[in-house]
Amino acid sequence: MNEHSLSQSLENCICLLTEACPPGTLPWMLGGSCGLVLQGVDIDREPRDIDMYADEAEAGSLHRAWGVWSTDKPEWSFTDRYRSLLSHYCHERVTAELVGSFKVTTPECRYETVIVEGLWPVGPEHILGRHNIRLMPLAHELVFNLLREREDRTQAIVRVMNREPDQHVAAMRAVWNRCQASSRFAERLCALCPQVMAGIIPSRIDREGEEE
C-alpha cells in the first residue's frame, strides 16, 4: 500500500475519538500502521486497526472520554519483551487500542515511550477531515520496529526518513533519550540513517571510547 490516506471507516473512527477527546486536551498520539501511512511510509497492506499512545497519567481520563466505545478496562500487560497499559475500543467493526506507558526491552535496548515530556513536542501534526491530530514520529517507529525485528517495516521507514533527514533529528533525539542501548544497536541506527544520527549517537559513542 502506498497511498497516503486511510480507509473511510478508519478515518471515521479516528475522527470520532478525536471529537470525544481532542489531543490538545489530553495528549494522545496516533501510531502503528495508520501513522505510518499518513507519513508516506509504504506498507504491504491497508491498515486494519488503530493504535494510540499516551502516558499512564492520561490513560484513565482518555478511557473515560471514550467509554461508550470501550470493550474492556485498562489493564497492565506484561510479556518477556513488552510492558504496557492496554485498553480497547470498537466502532462499526473498527478496533482501536490505547497503549499507555509502553516499554519494550530486548538484549540490545530498552526503550520507553514518553508522550508529554518526550514525543508530543516533536510529533508531526496531521489534518484528518476537519481534525488536527498528532502522529508518533517515524523515529519512534524505526526504533520500535528494529526492536521487534520487523525488517520490512524498518526498511520502509528508513526510506522516508532518509529523504529529508533534518526533519527527523529532533524526534530521534527525543527517542534516543529514552533508550538504554548497546553500542551494537547504536551502530545499527547509524548505518540505517547516518544523517539523522550524525549529531546524536556518534558523540555518545565517542565519549564511551574516551572513557575506556
Image (cartoon, rainbow, N blue to C red):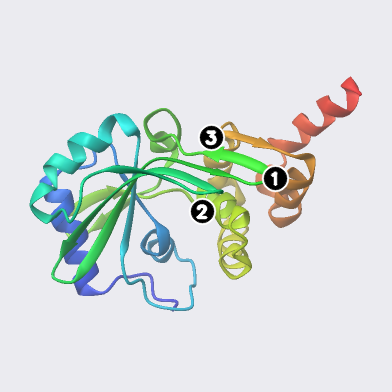
State the residue position of label 2.
Answer: 141
3 or 1: mark nearer the eye? 1
- Closest to the observer, 60 or 38: 60
Q: Residues within 10 Å of mark 3 (few under 14, many from 20)?
A: many
30 on left or right of 165: left
Q: Are marks 3 and 1 in contact (CB under 8 Å)?
A: no
Residue 20 picture location, percent across and down: 11, 47
Residue 26 seen by the camera: no
Tell me the SS state at disc 1: loop
> Which residue is drawn at the image coordinates 46% and 48% (left, top)?
137
Residue type, numbered disc 2: Glu
Name the residue at 74% across, 48% down. 190
Q: Position of residue 18 (x, y in %)?
A: 18, 50
Left or right, residue 45 beside residue 133: right
Question: Sequence order check: which comes first, mark 3 or mark 1?
Answer: 1
Residue that appears at 56% across and 66% down: 153
* Secondary structure under the numbered disc 2 in the rendered image: helix
Pair 1/2: label in front: 1
From the image, tell me which residue sits under label 1: 107
Question: Which residue is identified by label 3?
Answer: 174
Name the foreground residue: 4 vs 92.
Answer: 92
- Where is 146 relative to 104, above or below? below
Circle nearer the N terminus (1, 2): 1
Query: CA gap, disc 3 to disc 2?
Result: 13 Å
Q: CA distance from mark 1 to mark 2?
A: 19 Å
